[in-house]
Amino acid sequence: MLDERAIGWWRARWLLLTGAPVLASAVLGALIGPARWWLWPAAGILAAAGLGCAAFFPRWWFRFHRWEVTDDAVYVRTGAFRQEWRIAPMSRIQTVDTVRGPLEQVFRLATVTVTTASAKGAIRIRGLDHELAAELAGRLTRITGATPGDAT
């Protein structure tokens, strides 16, 4: 399961994502008098929508995101409406990376990226405690190093 701090991280991302356009609309409304009648209400509607999404979606997403690592494969499930279950066999893993963006660092979280030769792209396990992410990357590196390659 993901770390519960991922909820706060997702909320902060929502607020930052909506905060910039809200601020821009409010400032433009203050500077451009004739456009004030529609810029300020638009900023208010966008702010309300952003706050509502930040309050609801992160906790909801947390309920659906799952991951598991076995000696045979990495499993990641994401999505609420359209659920996606990705499986990367250890023999197909090419690289394992750990990434910590600035906002993830504030919440002491990290993302582990498992790259395979799949056309679907890399598997990302987001919202992990940064220490757990480092341990997981090391574990995956050890397991994949000891796993013989797939002959197919």
Image: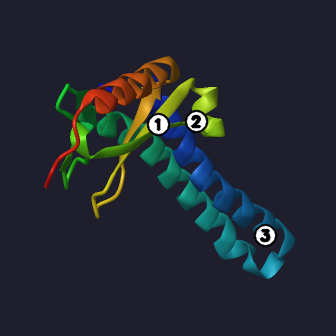
Residue 1, percent from left and from top? 29, 25
Label 1 crowd bin: few (<14), some (14–19), many (20+), radius 10 Å: many
Q: Is residue 122 above or below residue 145?
A: below
**Which residue has dot 3 on it?**
28
In the image, 12 versus 116, the foreground residue is 116
Residue 111: which numbered mark, if any?
Answer: 1
The answer to which of 76 and 32 lies nearer the viewer is: 76
Query: Quick one: SS at disc 1?
Result: strand
Amino acid type at mark 3:
Leu
Mark before the other along the chain sequence, 2 or 1: 2
The amino acid beneath tag 2 is Arg
Looking at the image, which residue is at 82% across and 76% down?
33
Please tell me whether mark 2 sits on a helix, a strand or a loop: loop
Q: Is residue 61 left or right of residue 137?
A: left
Q: Nearer the viewer, residue 54 or 31?
A: 54
Tags 2 and 1 touching, CB below 8 Å = yes
Q: Position of residue 117 (x, y in %)?
A: 31, 57
- Tell me if residue 93 can be seen: yes
Q: Which residue is mark 2?
A: 100
For this orientation, the residue located farthest to the bottom is: 34
Q: If you read the primary sequence from the N terminus, does the residue marked by circle 3 or circle 2 appear first?
A: 3
Instruction: Please name which of the two marks, 1 or 3, marks the residue nearer to the observer.
Output: 1
Indicate whether 132 appears above or below 91. Answer: above
The three-letter amino acid code for the residue at tag 1 is Thr
